[in-house]
Image: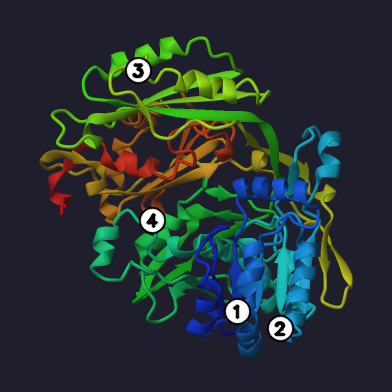
Amino acid sequence: MTGPLRIGNASGFYGDRFSALAEMIDGGELDVLTGDYLAELTMLILGRDRLKDPNLGYAKTFLRQLEEALGPALERGVRIVSNAGGLNPAGLAAAIGELAGRLGLQPRIGYVAGDDVRSLAAEHGLGEPLTANAYLGGWGIAECLAGGADIVVTGRVTDASLVVGPAAAHFGWTRQSYRELAGAVVAGHVIECGTQATGGNYSFFGELAELADLVHPGFPIAEVAADGSSVITKHPGTGGAVTVGTVTAQLLYEIAGPRYLGPDVTARFDTIQLRQAGPDRVAISGVIGEPPPPTVKVSLNSIGGFRNQVDFVLTGLDIEAKAALVRKQLAGVRADSVEWTLQRTDQPDPSSEAAASATLRCVVRDANPDVIGRRFSDAAVQLALASYPGFHLTAPPGAAQPYGVFEAGYLAASLVEQVAVLPDGTRVNVEPPAEFADPVDYPELPEPVLPGALPAGPTRRGPLGRLIGARSGDKGGSANLGVWVPDARLLPWLAATLTVDRLRGLLPELAELRIDRYVLPKLSAINFVIDGLLGRGVAYNARFDPQAKALGEWLRARYVELPEEFLR
């Protein structure tokens, strides 16, 4: 009970590497293997699956992965914990039982229920969504493991709860073990997105490639200690790398301010300390935990209406005039929403036709699919011989398709009835926390005063990415943009250079949006939260990059004055 608990991850999203579950079980020592399959868009997909068949609503891929991995996991004593239950954890648990029977295996299966709060939505001002799921914590998972489960499947728990639950059960933590719980949350946040912690989607991938094979990066492991500290690593001989940089990048992914709110604990991300503890080993320590908030977040997905799209390719000269002509010709299109976006990817004196071309996108949305279906498609196609020179489309327009919208709601934690169903069928009610701390009652954390001086030497104009890394992502209709400097001496320069106003100037698409900035000195990082950039969530498809995954790389490509002494 005193040694570290080795918790691996084999999935960062529904559609991740299929072979990862078997790779992780076969690749080295593990105590627990987790799999994260749920995202805001995934809940919408599963909701539509459930409309077609009430017996569905879970991640079917997980079942197919278990066909190969279940036997070896049981042989090696590796417990599996996954949120692949989606909207139907009981259904997935039953399906695993049927699969095990066909394979001649007898795993002990537990599941966690209670996250589905559709019955409470209307009464508490959350409307009548297609799906309404509260983000549960790790204590239901802990109950199932304490009850002897070899496999635990859940619905919508927080991603980090897949690590918190096993650690709490293994070490006997209490509900008030805030420091330990917060440390496990941080470890869980690092490994939840799989290979993003081992070099995937990493800004400095070119430098990393000199040290490691990035073709097939291994999935991460968190060695969690009894005090909540951890070491992030991976199986020996696997691709990728675990460095302070790769861990920092993942820590900045999809966060907001220094207080990272969760259903079991509030983790203070401004207290995280990282240290390279050896090759492919990064130690995490010092994380402070505070009581959780009195409310839990609820993921609300609804069908927002219908959507159609057509992309016109504009080539050569007079791009703006060609775009204006198309817009005039389709001015008669009537829909609840008509959005035009001109993507200027064309270059002067182009050496290829692709380099000479830009794209004009028209997106229409309406409650009536007939309005934006064949009628809209026909209007676009009929311009083929009557519009700008070189007219063509990227693909023929199709029928209108339903689109989803995401909203975050909140419920009092006391209203959510979390239940752990043990392998023997016993149902254990998981009580809400006995102690809360409302974030509005916390004193506001002032922006820290940074030690050190600004570089005083000469500067050279160049891309920000020469000196900073970035990681960005989506949270509903908002986006986060985390940036860090590998050299801590550059943090005062970064903080002085990248103000909110400067960020708006560098990324004009953000100019009219609310932006909050948070400085995290111990990570040599700054996090920006951009409210409203993504409209009504990823399925709404509000912009060219609907999940803001490349927002950070856009920023790194912008030119500013860089201190020469730090240029490599």
**Disc 3 marks which residue?**
323
Q: What element carries label 4?
A: loop
Q: Horizontally, is 475 left or right of 277 in the view? A: right
Q: How crowded is mark 4: few (under 14 residues within 10 Å), some or many (20 or more)?
A: some
Type of amino acid under label 4:
Asn
Decide: marks 1, 3 in contact (CB < 8 A)? Answer: no
Left or right: 327, with 164 as reference point = left
Q: In this view, does 393 lie to the left or right of 421?
A: left
Spatial CA distance of label 3 from label 2 is: 60 Å
Q: Which of the numbered marks, if any, corresponds to residue 201?
A: 4
Q: Which of marks 4 and 2 is nearer the N terminus?
A: 2
Query: Could you say where residue 309 lies in the image, as x and y percent from the top left?
Result: 50, 29
Q: Distance between the residues labelled 1 and 2?
A: 10 Å
- State if disc 2 and disc 1 touch (CB < 8 Å): no
Residue, disc 1: 68
Residue 81 point in image, percent of width and height: 66, 70
Q: Do the residues labelled 4 and 3 touch (CB within 8 Å)?
A: no
